[in-house]
Amino acid sequence: MRKSFYFKSLCFMLISFLLLLGCSNQQSSSDSSHQKINLRFAAGSQSGDWYPLAVGITEMMKKNMNNLDQVSIEQGGGVANVMSVNKKQTEIGFSHGMSIIDGIKGNPPFKEKNENLTYVVSLDPYYMQIAVLKGSGINKIEDLKGKRINVGPKSATTEVAARMVLEAYGMSFEDMKSVEHLSHGDSVEQMKDKRLDALFWVMGAPFGAMTDLTETKDIEFLPIPEDKIQLLSDKNPAILKGTIKAGTYRGQDTDVTTLKTPLAVVANKDAPDDLVYEATKTIFNGLSELGKISPALKNVKPEDLPIDIGLSMHPGAKKFWEEQGLVK
């Protein structure tokens, strides 16, 4: 009788313990799934195209992620964002394909290998756009020698690409009369005032500042021949042949052959999987809405988003692309 009582008591205690343990684990799992996540998104200057695009992406993410807490958009650039994401100063960021490849290899302007980057998605291609005033007498890249040029912020992707293009012609910045590092808006204003002879920009086509310039001035774009593009591609496989289609800008009546490189989203390898998954999903499902912010995205097809650029994919992004059947 006493043994039966002790046995029943022991069973009751054991069952109670197991129930409490199960509830504790369930609560722990629930707390983990609702853990607050912060997002720092590496974009560009507020006068450029990346900043409003990052705002659009993160605003959509806020609506779909209950645990997304603080969101900040950090101003940077193609080169700066590679280093920022690599050092986990930001979780996710934009950069150009050519800068990403240079970054992971530690090629100039990078001083070390950036090996903490993972791939999320490729967006629209970015084109080298070399603009000159119509009737300036500058008809080809060789004619830029001794001229006043703008190449964007120091160490940014446009400056790196401009150096490479000039080197392909046996020239350097030292061969120019002056080399400015102005923002989109400032460079356009100086071009309008004829204080600059040429603008270099690696941007989507069209992009706002160039559209503004072509609406007020007659502009021509200098082409880059295929043999020069191949020479550059041999140094960086993310540099490809591209075409700025006729009619992209006012007064542009013919196609312009130039180099292109994809705009990509990268994430730190330790960024939370669900954060990167949601960012990938947001871009995929919101492509048409994002096209209202960045017109160049209107020509991008959803199935073209997960293009291999030679970088390992973040697990969160891979999970989403596998669900869509776009990545094996």
Image: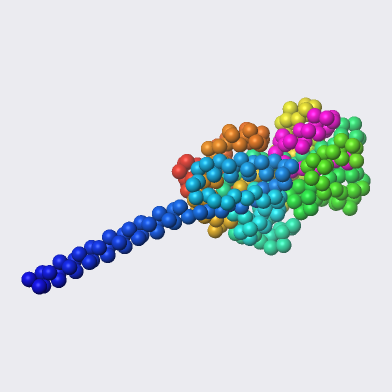
**2 vs 56, nearest the viewer:** 2
The correct choice, above or below, for 23 with respect to 309 in the image is: below
User: From this viewpoint, which residue is outermost toward the bottom?
Assistant: 2
Q: How many dots with numbers?
A: 0
Q: Residue at x 56, y 37 (%)?
A: 286
Q: Which is more toward the observer, 179 or 327?
A: 179
Q: Residue 209: within the magenta?
A: yes
Q: Which quadrant, please, contains the N terminus?
A: bottom left
- 129 left or right of 273? right
Residue 233: give x, y in percent of width and height: 70, 48
- Magenta highlight range: 196-220
Q: Is residue 199 visible?
A: no
**Closest to the observer, 309 or 305:** 305
Position of residue 245 relative to residue 19, above or below, is above
At 69% from the left and 60% from the top, the residue drawn is: 106
Q: Quadrant of residue 136?
A: top right
Image quadrant where residue 226 sits: top right
Snapshot colouring:
rainbow
Q: Is residue 47 magenta?
A: no
Q: Residue at point 85% right, 51% down? A: 172
Residue 200 percent location from the top left of the image:
80, 43
Residue 285 in sight in this render:
yes
Task: Pinpoint residue 139: horizontal percent, then vertical percent.
Answer: 87, 36
Q: Nearer the viewer, residue 26 or 107?
A: 26
Residue at 54%, 58% in the rendered image: 270
